[in-house]
């Protein structure tokens, strides 16, 4: 008997899969927004969540669906700070602006 691998599984070997910080579902990296932490206001001034749609920013990245639901849940849970290893709750202004909120 020949085992037929479904296209979705065959693809998963090459396509990076990440977990959304909001709904905790796994999704292809391309379906999620990469977010990095930046201290653009200077050291000690707190951290900002910086959307990185091109996935070019160095450092640790977190992934979330770019929807109000997933972003809000992730922020409320404090998931970004944990995932990005920054203390406290990073400022989410830039990310919310991207959502039009
Ligand atoms: Zn999600």
Image (cartoon, grey):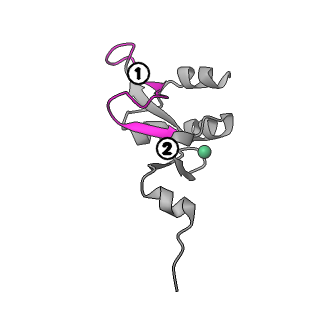
Residue 21 placement, left or right of 38: right
Which label lies toward us, 2 or 1? 2
Q: Nearest the camera: 8 or 32? A: 8
Q: Nearest the camera: 5 or 46? A: 5
Residue picked out by circle 1 = 46
Residue 35 is one of the magenta-drawn residues: no
Residue in view at x 32 percent, y 29 percent: 58
In the figure, residue 45 lies in which quadrant? top left
Q: Position of residue 42 (x, y in %)?
A: 34, 13
Q: Position of residue 53 (x, y in %)?
A: 49, 29
In the figure, residue 40 lies in which quadrant? top left
Separation (CA) of disc 2 from disc 1: 27 Å
Q: Tag 1's secondary structure?
A: loop
Q: Magenta span covers which residues? A: 40-63
Residue in view at x 37 percent, y 27 percent: 57
Whether 42 is drawn above or below 13: the answer is above
Residue in view at x 42 percent, y 53 percent: 14
């Amino acid at each position: 008997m020949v085992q037929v691998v479904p296209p979705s599984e065959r693809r998963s070997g090459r396509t990076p899969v990440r977990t959304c910080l909001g709904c905790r579902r796994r999704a292809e990296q391309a379906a999620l927004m990469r977010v990095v932490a930046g201290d653009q206001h200077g050291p000690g001034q707190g951290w900002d969540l910086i959307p990185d749609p091109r996935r070019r920013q160095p450092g640790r990245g977190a992934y979330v669906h770019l929807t109000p639901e997933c972003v809000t849940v992730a922020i409320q849970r404090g998931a970004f700070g944990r995932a990005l290893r920054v203390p406290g709750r990073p400022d989410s202004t830039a990310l919310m602006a991207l959502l039009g909120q």
